[in-house]
C-alpha cells in the first residue's frame, strides 16, 4: 500500500507546510476538493484492513500517537485509537482527568512535555475553539512542525474527521455528490459537525445543502456558507437524499433557546412520518451521541434508512487515511 504525500495549492493555511503538503488536519475549510477526495480514496483502500485476520499495516510503525481528549468522547477517541493501532503506531491516551492539567499545568506546557517524550502526532479534542491551532502555532515556534496535529473537535468550530467520515458515508451510499440535496437538522448553532459537513458538502459540489432548525439554533448569516435556511422540518426534508440529524448541545447553550425538549421533538424530531417526506431511498445520518425522543425517533434511528453505525465503522478507515497522509509528509 502506498503512503502518498499529496500536495495542494499553497495559500495561507496552517495545515499546509512550505511545500503545500497537508501536515496537520485542523479544518475542512480551506481544503480543496482534491484533498478531500484523496482522503476518501485512501480511506477506501483501508476499509478492508478491518476484515483481515491480522488487522494491521505498518505505515506508522515506530511512531507515537498521543490522544489528548480534554472533552468527553466515545466514537472519536476510540476510533482514532483503533485507527492508529491498525497503522502499527504506539498509542498513548492521556488520562486528562488524572493528568497535571488538574494541577494547573497549561495546555502548551503539557504539549512541551509530551514532545519531550518523542510524540509524533497529537489527536486533540478541546472545548475551546482554536485549541489545536494554538498547538500548531506553538510547535512551529519551538521548531517542531514535524509533530502533526489532528483536530478531533474544537468547541463549536470544527470536527474535520467527522466531516470526512460523513462524506465517506454519503459517497458510499449515493456514489455521486453533484445531484444530492442534503438536510442538516437541529442545533447547527453549537455544532462543529455541521460546520465541517457544510464546508465539505459545498466543496464537493452537492446540489443543495439545507440548514433546518429554529431561528435560535441557526448561526446568524449562515446563508453565507452556501446553504438554504429552512425553519420548517417539512420543507427541509422535502425530496432530500440525505438527512443529517444533530443533537441539542445543551452543554454549549447559554440560557434557554428552546421551550422544552418535548416541544422540540414535536417540531423537529425525525419520526417515520417526517422521514417519509424525503426521497424513499434517503439515508439518515447522525454523528452521535443520539438523544432518542429529542431529535430522533427510535423507529428511525434503528430503521432501514439509518446509516448511523456504518458511519462509525467508516470513521476508522477515514482516520487511518488522515494519519497515514500526515505521517507521509
Ligand atoms: N461524533 C462524535 O464526535 O462522537 P463522540 O463525541 O463520541 O466522539
Image (cartoon, rainbow, N blue to C red):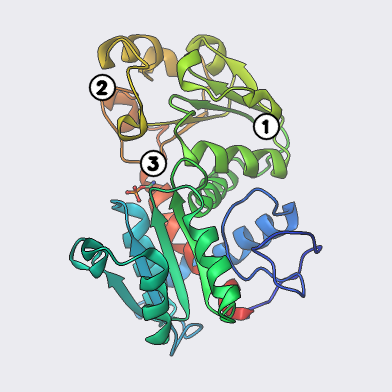
- Mark 1 — residue? 225
**Towards the viewer: 70 or 242:** 70
| Residue at (57, 14) in percent of width and height | 230
Is 220 placed left or right of 207 in the picture? left
| Residue at (69, 38) in percent of width and height | 202
Residue lying farthest to the front in this orientation: 104
The earlier-in-sequence mark between 3 and 2 is 2
**Towards the viewer: 232 or 9:** 9
**Quadrant location of the C terminus?**
bottom right
SS at mark 3? helix
- Mark 3 — residue? 308
Please say if 282 is above or below 314: above
The earlier-in-sequence mark between 1 and 3 is 1
Please provide percent x and percent y for residue 108.
42, 68
Please say if 88 is above or below 81: below
Residue 287, disc: none
Asked if labels 3 and 1 touch by Cβ distance under 8 angstroms, the answer is no
Q: Is residue 318 visible?
A: no
What is the distance, in whole Å, between disc 1 and disc 2 at their CAs? 30 Å
The earlier-in-sequence mark between 1 and 2 is 1
Please say if 152 is above or below 185: below
Between disc 1 and disc 2, the foreground one is 1
- Mark 2 — residue? 293
**Quadrant location of the N terminus?**
bottom right
What is the distance, in whole Å, between disc 3 and disc 2 at their CAs? 16 Å
Amino acid at each position: 500500500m502506498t503512503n502518498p504525500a499529496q500536495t495542494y495549492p499553497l495559500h495561507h493555511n496552517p495545515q499546509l507546510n512550505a511545500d503545500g503538503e497537508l501536515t496537520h488536519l485542523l479544518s475542512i475549510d480551506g481544503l480543496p476538493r482534491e484533498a478531500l477526495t484523496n482522503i476518501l480514496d485512501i480511506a477506501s483502500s483501508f476499509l478492508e484492513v478491518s476484515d483481515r485476520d491480522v488487522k494491521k499495516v505498518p505505515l506508522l510503525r515506530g511512531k507515537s500517537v498521543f490522544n489528548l481528549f480534554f472533552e468527553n468522547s466515545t466514537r472519536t477517541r476510540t476510533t482514532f485509537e483503533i485507527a492508529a493501532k491498525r497503522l502499527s503506531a504506539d498509542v498513548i491516551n492521556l488520562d486528562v482527568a488524572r493528568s497535571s492539567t488538574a494541577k494547573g499545568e497549561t495546555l502548551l506546557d503539557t504539549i512541551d512535555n509530551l514532545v519531550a517524550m518523542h510524540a509524533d502526532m497529537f489527536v486533540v479534542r478541546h472545548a475551546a475553539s482554536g485549541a489545536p491551532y494554538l498547538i500548531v502555532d506553538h510547535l512551529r515556534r519551538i521548531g517542531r512542525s514535524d509533530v502533526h496535529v489532528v483536530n478531533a473537535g474544537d468547541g463549536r468550530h470544527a470536527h474535520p474527521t467527522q466531516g470526512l467520515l460523513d462524506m465517506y458515508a454519503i459517497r458510499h451510499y449515493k456514489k455521486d455528490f453533484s445531484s444530492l440535496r442534503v438536510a442538516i437538522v437541529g442545533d447547527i448553532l453549537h455544532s462543529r459537525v455541521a460546520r465541517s459537513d457544510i464546508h465539505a458538502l459545498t466543496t464537493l459540489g452537492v446540489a443543495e445543502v439545507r440548514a433546518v432548525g429554529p431561528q435560535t439554533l441557526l448561526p446568524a448569516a449562515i446563508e453565507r456558507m452556501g446553504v438554504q435556511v429552512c425553519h420548517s422540518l417539512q420543507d427541509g426534508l422535502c425530496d432530500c437524499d440525505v438527512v443529517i440529524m444533530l443533537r441539542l448541545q445543551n452543554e454549549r447553550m447559554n440560557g434557554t433557546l428552546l421551550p422544552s425538549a418535548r416541544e422540540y421533538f414535536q417540531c423537529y424530531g425525525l419520526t417515520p412520518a417526517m422521514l417519509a417526506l424525503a426521497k424513499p431511498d434517503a439515508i439518515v445520518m447522525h454523528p452521535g451521541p443520539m438523544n432518542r425522543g429529542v431529535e430522533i425517533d427510535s423507529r428511525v434511528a434503528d430503521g432501514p434508512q439509518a446509516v448511523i453505525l456504518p458511519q462509525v465503522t467508516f470513521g476508522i478507515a477515514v482516520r487511518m487515511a488522515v494519519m497515514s497522509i500526515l505521517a507521509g509528509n
